[in-house]
Amino acid sequence: MITALFFAALLGAQDPQAPAPDWEAQGREALAERLAVEPKTGPARNVILFIGDGMDITTISAARILGGQKQGLSGEENVLGFETLPHTALSKTYNTDMQTPDSAGTATAMLSGRKTRSGMLNVDQGVPRGDCEAARGAPLDTLADVAAASERSVGIVTTARLTHATPASVYASAPERDWESDADMPADSACADIARQLLDRAEAINLKVAFGGGRSNFLPQDMADPEYEDRTGRRMDGRNLVEAWNAMSRDNRFVWNEEGFEDLDPAAGGAVLGLFEPSHLRYEPDRQTEGADEPSLAEMTRFAIEKLDQDEDGYFLMVESGRVDHAHHAGNAARALEETLSLDEAVKAALETVDLDETLILVTADHGHTLSFAGYPQRGNPILGIVKSADSDGEAVVRTGTDGRPYTTLGYANGPGALAVGAMGAADAPLLRPDLGDEQAQHLDYRQQSLVPSPSETHGGQDVAVYAAGPGAYLVGGVLEQNVLYYVMEHALTGAGTP
């Protein structure tokens, strides 16, 4: 953990009038902390896997600064909660057929221990994408199966649809990640859609908590949504999977809003299904400002831990901040960073709740994005703002490109922010970037400028970070193939691989 001396040195560094921090003392203190780290080698009763969808290292660095600046600091000295975990590694994210991966293939690697094709969930890499018949003979067991086989409970928490790729990787097997409802399936398909698989597999994997969005995939198309009068379900088979969930046990509960969530008792029997939106949950800053009728990721995580902890044999819990990815695709760095901070709050909630002597925690991402962090901004420059550097008198001066226009610290290699202003139809006229100001750049809705025009920003193929604490966390180190994380978690739960 980070020491008081370390924080004192860093806080002093943000004020140019303050005495220079004692970097030597800070360095020796940090070294002493590393020397004191002892690997926990015993078995884990519980495993919690946190996934920030699209949360690459650039996103983490920028979110760290934003979090510090929201506290009135310069930002660079800030430390996120999950950054205090003592063991770290890099994870290689490629799919078997793609250099830059998608979330289904990467989630499969972490949950099943096997890499596979882009777009496929817990299906062997030899199966062609979308081939139902081939996929039916090649499903992959997941960490949820391992946990259930040892009488542990299983939980899923996400801000995306529960049927979206990452949460679906806990319970579903599908050659096409987009088969979320039967409305998405090919005609006469013999495969089960992903929403139906959650019900079909719930008892087999001892699923006790499932929180997220995607309500429309569980309701028939002629049924009105309980929250929005102009919305209905999507299912074409006429089945109401919410009713089917409640019918599985008289103790089962279904909730769809914050009031229902707050009425839940983690000590009660049965299992809980929470579907808080027809599609994805709100972005965290919108949830706070628009009075969204849904709990936060941290609140759902804390409840899930308290609920699962009722099982004396332990549990496996997967928690996803799914909308980091969605904000990046929209070229909207502000919301991507806010969603990263939301995941950090969920990790902090877990650290306050669990015993790290018996719980392995991993925090990672499934893949990266094309976010860049550049431009020589001075220390403490707003991370979402335009780049300013100090001149010879120490005054902040806006830096510009060769076109004379300001630019932001954060940008994207591709995406919707590439739209420019100027005489685009005139062959002899230059294409001009917008003349950007700080107020516009720091607005929550601002789309950062990007190099290549695209309606949706793409994933990145870079390695992502892994942070770990608890029994078996010392196995997280170096540069790992992403599927190795499965074997670290399996070993913690079962001792598999022990000589």
Image: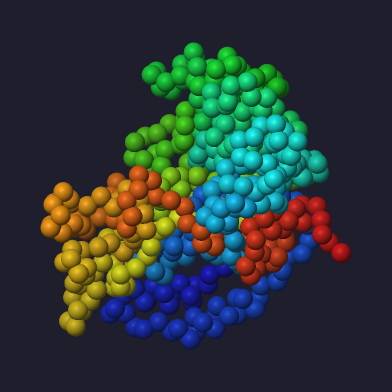
User: Where residue 453 sits: x, y (%)?
Assistant: 32, 51
Residue 338 in the figure: left or right of residue 220: left
The residue sitting at 41% across, 47% down in the picture is 329
Pick out the residue farthest to the front: 427
The residue sitting at 37% across, 34% down in the picture is 291
Residue toward you, 338 or 118: 118
User: Where residue 271 sits: x, y (%)?
Assistant: 67, 30
Is residue 322 in view from this perspective? Answer: yes
User: Where residue 301 sits: x, y (%)?
Assistant: 57, 44
The residue sitting at 36% across, 77% down in the picture is 13
Q: Quadrant of the C terminus?
A: bottom right
Q: How many marks?
A: 0
Residue toward you, 483 or 20: 483
Residue toward you, 273 or 431: 431
User: Where residue 429 sits: x, y (%)?
Assistant: 13, 57
Colour convention: rainbow
Q: Quadrant of the N terminus?
A: bottom right
Residue 301 in the figure: left or right of residue 20: right
Quarter-of-image position of residue 312: top right
The residue sitting at 16% across, 49% down in the picture is 425
Residue 161 to residue 78: above or below: above
Residue 425 to residue 390: above or below: above
Pick out the residue farthest to the bottom: 24
Quarter-of-image position of residue 467: bottom right
Is residue 67 in view from this perspective? Answer: no
